[in-house]
Image: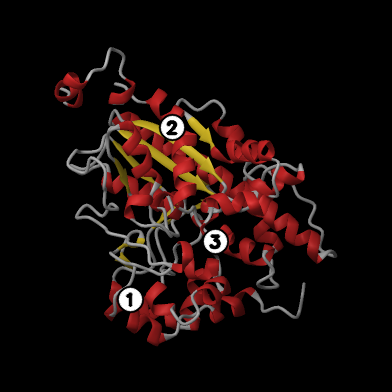
Amino acid sequence: MDTDLPSFSQYLESMAVDEEVIHRWTREPSWMSFDAELGYTLANSMPAEGIDGCGTITTIDSTGARRRMVYAEDRPRINSYGNSFTHCQQVSDGETWQEYLGGHLGEPIGNFGVGGYGVYQAFRRLLREEQTDHGADYLIFYVWGNDSVRSLTRCFRAFVGPRMDVLYAGREAEMFHGNPWSNIEFDPVSKAFVERPNLLADEADLLALSDPAWMRDNLRDDVALQLSTFADGLQSSLDIEVADSMATALGRQLSWKLGDPEALRGQAKALLDTYGNVATLEILARLERFAGERDKRLLVVINDGDYRALPQMREGVDRFDQELLDGLSEASYPVIDMTAITFEEYVDSGIPWQSFKDRHYVNGTGHFSPAGNHHFAYAIKDGIVSWLEPKPRPYESGSRSAIDYDSYMKRS
């Protein structure tokens, strides 16, 4: 092991949050608020993180969804769930892919995405919202990048670690979203996935995050967190016995390369990928059952952005999420692989990758820009139209004329 790095226990202790950050976060405006089940949900905000460094207007309505601009007076028959690429962070309310797509289809799309969520947290949000009077008949579920691993970890703060400190230096209280949340983990003994409640019952408990011993004692048996931080070179410890037990339970036999730290980190990353892919397939199976029991129709979008799968495709090596795609190949619901669509478009463009990204991402790096969300909306349009019954009003069969408008826009 690399003795220049902290042990896993030392790393966890170092992830304790400054008490003043927690005090400020609970009393000052923030882009999110505490949630005992999901860790946090969104609040109105206008962070300066858009194109040209502009502020981005984010408005949250009474249902907890992002404000709808097009056909806002109508109740959506489509709701969308996922992380920040569903929420459309770094653009304003009218610039999301839901707004562009809804404007084209002639109907609103509910946006319940939350930045930072994993697959499991988005699933739990969906279960909550879809059992209310603002639930919808059609559900778009968006799986991005490392959402599969976020599902498995107990505390987002410890998972993102020093990267959050660098990203939000000087804005830690305003942008804090490192809360523990409900998560899903695999139990090697029972060989089953178990759902775990949030470690913190209410907002008053948040000060526990400032206690290094609490962080260590509550997270040191988080296997996904240990694998992730070890693979990323954030700490030096890998419990081989625990990792091997997990690998065996997931049907993987590994000959651990103990004398080669770099290779060992690669093995930890590969095991974590398997763990996340299998967990996501389990969550989607539960989601499919939920939707079927309530006569709702499901569509899943897979999109990596520029996280790992797209770089791997450009390098001609296997995608880290291939096991997930293989598992979805015979799904009863439609799946749109936006990662593959983007790769094909990049190859066809014939331009350098960064130039391609500049067309679609805020400042060529972060989330989709308004142009990127517009592109995404039209890239998935055909799949959405074929999924919906009845078809969106612009796609209904029959003649069109100006005098047909009133009857055309109003369905019985």
Residue at image coords 28%, 12%: 398
Badge number at residue 205? 1
Q: Secondary structure at mark 2?
A: helix
Please, what is the three-letter code of the amino acid marked with disc 3? Answer: Asn
Q: Earlier in the sequence, mark 2 or mark 3?
A: 3
Residue 155 visible in the picture: no
Q: Secondary structure at mark 3?
A: helix
What residue sits right under mark 2 in the picture?
381
Check contact, mark 1 vs mark 2: CB within 8 A.
no
Residue at image coords 48%, 41%: 376
What residue sits right under mark 3 in the picture?
363
Please, what is the three-letter code of the amino acid marked with disc 1? Answer: Asp
62 with respect to 41 (left or right): left
Q: Earlier in the sequence, mark 1 or mark 2?
A: 1
| Extreme residue toward the bottom, this view | 20
How far apart marks 2 and 3 lie (CA) works out to 25 Å
Please, what is the three-letter code of the amino acid marked with disc 2? Answer: Lys
x then y, percent, for residue 265 = 73, 61
